[in-house]
Every structure is written in structure tokens, then in C-alpha cells.
């Protein structure tokens, strides 16, 4: 990411005039008082990355350090109201819009759809006083954040909240607006209706086979067959009676799942792993994706788990001690804005590395991609510099370049050579492992 793009990204989210205008529209400030809303919002969003104190306390400390008028702790907490929540909701919408404006990076087997979307939920445990508002699975309070994540842009697409006690499946709907995309979900969202809707609306999917689903094999395309297999034989029976051998080779078959009007025809793929076979259902074509490639695409779903770590380890999403629902929602929104900004910076750095490789016709990346957790932390320690640049009427690109250099230095992915992710590998962001320190010495 170059200096000009970083300036545009930060300015589009934190423009003082826009924030003050939104504050007036949403009536964040309804009477004259010493509230610097720009400092408040910037402090709230960037107060992730370290663990010196509580989230609200750290936001207060950063607010005061920004030069805003001093305020006592109780008065500061009283600003956490519905109007402030509405302002942050709009800021997150803009941050998501900025993230989705980045070019998609979908090379090779990822490029068969307009974009792959991963849907997952992360649970945040809350103060027990909120149990009536957000009941958890036990006798505690917890909120579940349902996130939709784009593989192409490496960023958040959408979100909504629900009590942690609720099941995941009703929170994912597949309609015509998803046509031409792909879907990667875990078993919490799996249902026969989901598969049927994907077929109806032209959505590709890869999903693990549920234990309680009893697929009936209609045709075996690939796999070691012990003897003749009668069509519509139960898949589990084939495995138990060694009619379909698990001999370390990939399995590919046409199956039917469900009964009667709820029957869904799908493709079943079995992939050998060190822990045994993993079975997936998919409607990807055999002409474009073999069984091993289907398994690889599903492994990309792990990116949402990494993203949950970004939220919790980087933006401290699970360190919320607020006792009012509105305060909880404000802190959740601030965390998601922070993480979305970091992931946007990471995506543009990825694109720059890939473009440089293309121009040089290189087989390996020449520098480390950034890691969103480290970028979040780098933005936190750069808070004063970021705030000063946003306050200036016409900051020089040199100053923004200095900030980008700092984010790049502090935000590097430490294990990019030795432990690249599946997505890094597919996107070509890998290089040969470096020498051990003893060898360098």
C-alpha cells in the first residue's frame, strides 16, 4: 500500500468534518459540552492491540492523550449512547465499503467463482448482568457475532449479532444476490435447505459431510471399489463393509442426501489426511476441481478462524466488561472497524507483492506479507501520529509514507516462510524457508 492510498483509506473513515457531521445528524452531542467527538471515535477504534487495562479505560486514556479536554471517567462512560452506536455503525459500513473496493486476489482454483465467502460466528462472553438480553448456552451472558468474510478481498463483508444461545443455521440465507459466488461454511450452518438453495440460485459450495446425513451413492466416479456396488447404497454401508476401500486414494461419487421432496443431489469427495479421510459435499464441477482441490478450497475456510483471532487477540473483542447493551455494541463496532482497516492494509500489501512478482517473473515473494494482528498493534502504537495526520488540513505524502513504513516494519508476518497459510500458498505469497539462526551465525 502506498502513501496516497493509506491517506485516502484513513481519511475516508476518520475525516473530522464527516465525523462531526454524523455526530450532528445522529445527535451524539445534544447540548453544549466538552466532547471532542473526533478524538473519542478515533480513540475507541484504535484502542486495540495492547492489554494495559480495560477497553473503555484505554479508550479514555488515548482520548486524553490526543489533546482533547479532560473528562472524568464517569462522564466519559456516559457518552456511550445509541447515537454514538449509530455513528460507529455508519463508520463500519464505510470501512467495509473501502475493504470491498480492493481488487480481489483469486488465482488458480479459487477463480471459478466471482468470490468465495466464508460464514462463521464468534462468541464473546459478557458480564452476567446482560444474561437476560444476550443469554449464553449456559447460565452466563454471551453475544454471537455472525460474520461473512470475503476470500477475494480478505476482509469483512457483513455481520449481525444474536444471543449466543441461538443456533447458527437460521442466520444464513442463500438468495439470488449470491449467484455466481462460492460458499464455505462449517457444520453449524449446514442444512439440506442450504444445499438446495445453493443449487436453485447458482451458488457453489464446499461443506463437510454431517455425521447424521446418510448419503446414498448413485455413482462412483473415483475410488477403489471392492466389488459391484448397487446404486443408491448407503455410503456408510459401503465404508463399513469395505465395498469402497479407503486405501489412501481420493474418492469421488455422485450421491443423494435427504428423502422425498427434500432430496438433494450432490457430489461427495473423500480426501485422505494423516488423521484419516475427510468427506465433503460440493457442487463444483469435476472438469475444474478434482477431489484434492476441493479439499484444499475447504481448508481456506480456516481463514475465518484466523480472522476471529484478529478480533480477539488484536482488537480485543473478548475483553468487554461493559454492563449496558449499548456500550457492548459500541465496543464491538469499534473492534470491527479497527480489524477491517488492518485487513484492508494487508490486502493492498498482498496485491503489491503479487504485482511485483508478476513484473519480475519471480517464483517466490521477495518480502513478507503483513499480518492483521501485527498491523492492529502497529496502528495502536502509532495512534498519536495517525491522529495528528488526520487533524492536519494538508499533510504531506511524505508523512503518510513514514507512517506506512512504520506499519510495514511492525506489521510483518513473522512466520510467512516457515508456516504459510493455505490461502498464502494459493495466492503465491510464499518463499523458501530461510536458514536457521545458527547457520547464519
Image: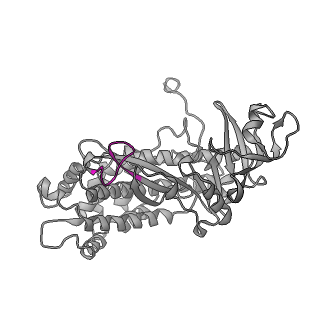
Tell me if 197 is positioned left or right of 94 in this view: right
Magenta highlight on residue 349: no
Residue 280 is left or right of residue 350, and the answer is right
* In-front residue for pair 330/187: 187
Q: Is residue 134 visible?
A: yes
Q: Is residue 32 above or below residue 398?
A: below
Which residue appears farthest toward the right when viewing the image?
228
x and y, in percent, of residue 183 in the image = 60, 56
**Which of the two residues, 415 or 433, is positioned nearer the viewer here?**
415
Residue 372 seen in the current view:
no
Where is residue 43 shown, x and y percent of the image?
Answer: 26, 56
Identity of the residue drawn at 69% across and 44% down: 214
Q: How many marks?
A: 0
Q: Which residues are magenta?
A: 130-144
Tell me residue 275's x, y (percent).
63, 30
Q: Is residue 136 magenta?
A: yes
Q: Main secondary structure of the magenta part?
A: loop
Amino acid at each position: 500500500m502506498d502513501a496516497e492510498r493509506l491517506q485516502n483509506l484513513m481519511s475516508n473513515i476518520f475525516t473530522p468534518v464527516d465525523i462531526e457531521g454524523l455526530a450532528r445528524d445522529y445527535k451524539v452531542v445534544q447540548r453544549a459540552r466538552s466532547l471532542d467527538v473526533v478524538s473519542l471515535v478515533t480513540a475507541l477504534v484504535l484502542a486495540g492491540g495492547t492489554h494495559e487495562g480495560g477497553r473503555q479505560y484505554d479508550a479514555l486514556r488515548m482520548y486524553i492523550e490526543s489533546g482533547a479536554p479532560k473528562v472524568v471517567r464517569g462522564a466519559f462512560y456516559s457518552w456511550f449512547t445509541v447515537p454514538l452506536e449509530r455513528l460507529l455503525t455508519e463508520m463500519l459500513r464505510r470501512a467495509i465499503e473501502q475493504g470491498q473496493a480492493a481488487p480481489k486476489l483469486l488465482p488458480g482454483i479459487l477463480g471459478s467463482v466471482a468470490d468465495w465467502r466464508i460464514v462463521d460466528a464468534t462468541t464473546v462472553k459478557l458480564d452476567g448482568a446482560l444474561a437476560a438480553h444476550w443469554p449464553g448456552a449456559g447460565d452466563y451472558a454471551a453475544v454471537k457475532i455472525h460474520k461473512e468474510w470475503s476470500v477475494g478481498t480478505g476482509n469483512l463483508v457483513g455481520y449481525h449479532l444474536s444471543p449466543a444461545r441461538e443456533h447458527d443455521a437460521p442466520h444464513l440465507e442463500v438468495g439470488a444476490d449470491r449467484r455466481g459466488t462460492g460458499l464455505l461454511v462449517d457444520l453449524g450452518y449446514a442444512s439440506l435447505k442450504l444445499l438446495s438453495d445453493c443449487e436453485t440460485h447458482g451458488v457453489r459450495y464446499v461443506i463437510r459431510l454431517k455425521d447424521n446425513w446418510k448419503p446414498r451413492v448413485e455413482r462412483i466416479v473415483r475410488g477403489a471399489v471392492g466389488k459391484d456396488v448397487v446404486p443408491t447404497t448407503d455410503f456408510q454401508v459401503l465404508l463399513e463393509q469395505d465395498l469402497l476401500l479407503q486405501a489412501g486414494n481420493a474418492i469421488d461419487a455422485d450421491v443423494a442426501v435427504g428423502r422425498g421432496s427434500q432430496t438433494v443431489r450432490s457430489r461427495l469427495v473423500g480426501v485422505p489426511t494423516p488423521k484419516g479421510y475427510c468427506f465433503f459435499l460440493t457442487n463444483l464441477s469435476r472438469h475444474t476441481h478434482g477431489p484434492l482441490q476441493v479439499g484444499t478450497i475447504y481448508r481456506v475456510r480456516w481463514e475465518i478462524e484466523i480472522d476471529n483471532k484478529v478480533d480477539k487477540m488484536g482488537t480485543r473483542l473478548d475483553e468487554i466488561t461493559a454492563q449496558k447493551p449499548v456500550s457492548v455494541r459500541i465496543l464491538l463496532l469499534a473492534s470491527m472497524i479497527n480489524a477491517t482497516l488492518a485487513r484492508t492494509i494487508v490486502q493492498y500489501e498482498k496485491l503489491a507483492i503479487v504485482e511485483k512478482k508478476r513484473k519480475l517473473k519471480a517464483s517466490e515473494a521477495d518480502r513478507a506479507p503483513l499480518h492483521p494482528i501485527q498491523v492492529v498493534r502497529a496502528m495502536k502504537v502509532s495512534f498519536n501520529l495517525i491522529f495528528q495526520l488526520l487533524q492536519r488540513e494538508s499533510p504531506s505524502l511524505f508523512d503518510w509514507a513514514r507512517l506506512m513504513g512504520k506499519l510495514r516494519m511492525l506489521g510483518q508476518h513473522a512466520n510467512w516462510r516457515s508456516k504459510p497459510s493455505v490461502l498464502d500458498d494459493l495466492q503465491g505469497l510464499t518463499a523458501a524457508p530461510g536458514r536457521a539462526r545458527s547457520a547464519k551465525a
